[in-house]
Image (cartoon, helix red, strand yellow):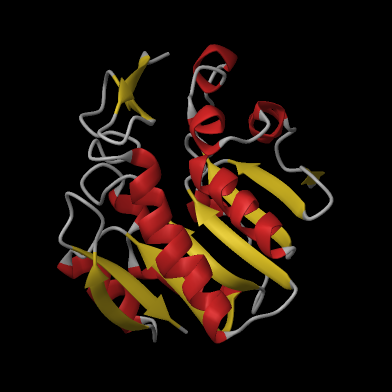
Amino acid sequence: MNKISIIHTADGSHTLIQDNMQEHYHSTFGAINESKHIFIENGLNYYFKKYPKNNYAILEIGFGTGLNALLTKIELANKQINCVYHTHETTLLNEEIYMSLNYPKILNVDPSLFYLMHQSTWDIPIMIDSLFELTKFLGKFENAFLAKNYYDIVFFDAFSPQIQPELWTENIFQKIYLSMKSNGVLTTYSTKGIVKNALKTNGFHIEKIPGPCGKREILRAFK
């Protein structure tokens, strides 16, 4: 098994890196700041301002450290909104790693909720609290079945096209497009030409918006 190391980022929060992969799970300019900017502010909260309602269905590609799920749970709890959160992952973190991550301390939340996200059984819906239902799917996203017209918001947070090229294809974005509701929003950190072309080919309208510290631009796409 590849060794995974914990790294401190510029905002004090942790990221991870595998010894066989020259790419961090989150930006070294600030893991929490990056996730908040790309997925919470420009995905979740952007959608909420345009289409406020009491129930959200969210899809995340790449559970990773669990940071995006934790931030989403916190944000929606503050708004008292129910959420069904589906996330797909192939790499398991061991207990020593996820219990060492400092997100609960920095975000001032009960660490047991964060640990439950990691400890919950794969492929089975788990109530993290009364408002947040989490299902983690273990396996390649290429083989996943997605319900049609189901998701309001998509967080596309796979490793980069250089590391995971199989996840940045027209076929993958077609699957995601069909799974999203009309007016659904997708956000991702990559603005590479192949990503923009794959999104547009499948009918997404895209826009480049300012990125977090250390990244000039990110992508937001609409169905």
Q: How many marks?
A: 0
- Measured from the top left, where is residue 144 in percent x and y? 59, 55
Q: Is any atom of residue 158 visible in this view?
A: no
Q: Is residue 191 left or right of residue 1?
A: left
Q: Tell me: residue 192, above or below residue 49.
A: above
Residue at position x 47%, y 46% from top?
62
Compared to residue 141, the image places residue 203 above or below, namely below
Q: Nearer the viewer, residue 60 or 215?
A: 215
Percent position of residue 200, x then y: 31, 82
In the rendered view, does 158 fall on the left or right side of 151?
A: left
Residue 84 located left or right of residue 25: right
- Residue 90: give x, y in percent of width and height: 51, 36
Q: Is residue 31 above or below residue 77?
A: above
Residue 163: percent from the left, percent from the top?
Answer: 26, 41
Q: Is residue 215 left or right of residue 36?
A: left
User: Residue extending furthest front?
Assistant: 108
Which residue is at a point 64% across and 81% down the rendered structure image?
Answer: 52
Determine if residue 41 is in view.
Answer: yes
Residue drawn 50% across and 41% down?
67
Indicate the quadrant containing the N terminus: top left, top right, bottom left or bottom right. Answer: top left
Kindly identify the residue that appears in the image at 35 percent across and 70 percent down: 170
Task: Quadrant for residue 92, please give it.
Answer: top right
